[in-house]
Amino acid sequence: VTGCKNDCPYCYARDIAARFMPSFEPTFHPERLNAPENTPVPVSDKPGANNVFVCSMADLFGDWVPEEWITAVLDQVEKHPEWNFLFLTKNPKRLPNYTWPKNAWVGATVDCQARVKATEEAFRRIDASVKFVSCEPLLEPVVFDDLSCFNWMIIGGRSRNSKMSEFQPEWAWVENLVDQAREAGLNVYFKPNLTVRPKEYPLS
């Protein structure tokens, strides 16, 4: 599936679509469902070599996406355990409606405080082998009430696109998130676009 109606101002996929696709309207591409079968699994010791970011140019769980599109994708995930399929959405309320194959990693974006409650409520009801929260781009300080339903936290900055400039969160925001994640026993992954570092100076 390509195309999205979230209309996020920092969207990179819209820029790519403007260059290479007719439009950014949600579109189903059934011919691509054969990709897991027709793509050789990389022979590599590198972690994540067999990971697939599903619908990187879309939000598969947006309210506008028909159930049959989602079902068709999940059927292929079930059939191909040689791959790990990563799902990421800004609409987590739909996630508990599905039975997740063991090779599905399920995540939601929490870029601001307003997304915390709905994400936590949804993930308490999700049965998946790996569950993650992606704080990318981190746009403001975020405090979670309960991270026990997650395995991973991803933290990133905002990359430049046609509408917005690059943005790095305050280090204090990042540090606070890391403290929350560590306390809850989560693994933390810093995206390459997160370049902010602590700014501490000795006092004279």
Image (cartoon, helix red, strand yellow):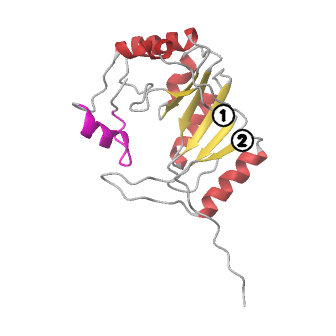
Whether the magenta-drawn stretch holds residue 15 is answered as yes
Give left or right: position of 14 versus 143. Answer: left
Where is residue 106 shown, x and y percent of the image?
58, 27
Q: Nearer the viewer, residue 179 or 20?
A: 20
Give the mark nearer the N terminus: 2 vs 1.
Answer: 1
Task: Identify the residue at the far left of this view.
Answer: 22
Image-quadrant location for residue 173: bottom right
Amino acid carrying mark 1 in the image: Pro
Task: Identify the residue at the far front of this view.
Answer: 43
**Cα separation between marks 2 and 1:** 14 Å
| Label 2: element kind | strand
Image-quadrant location for residue 46: top right
Q: Which residue is mark 1?
A: 47
Number of marks drawn: 2
Q: Is residue 102 above or below residue 195?
A: above
Write down the region rendered in magenta: 5-21
Quick one: label 1, few (<14), some, or many (20+) residues within 10 Å? few
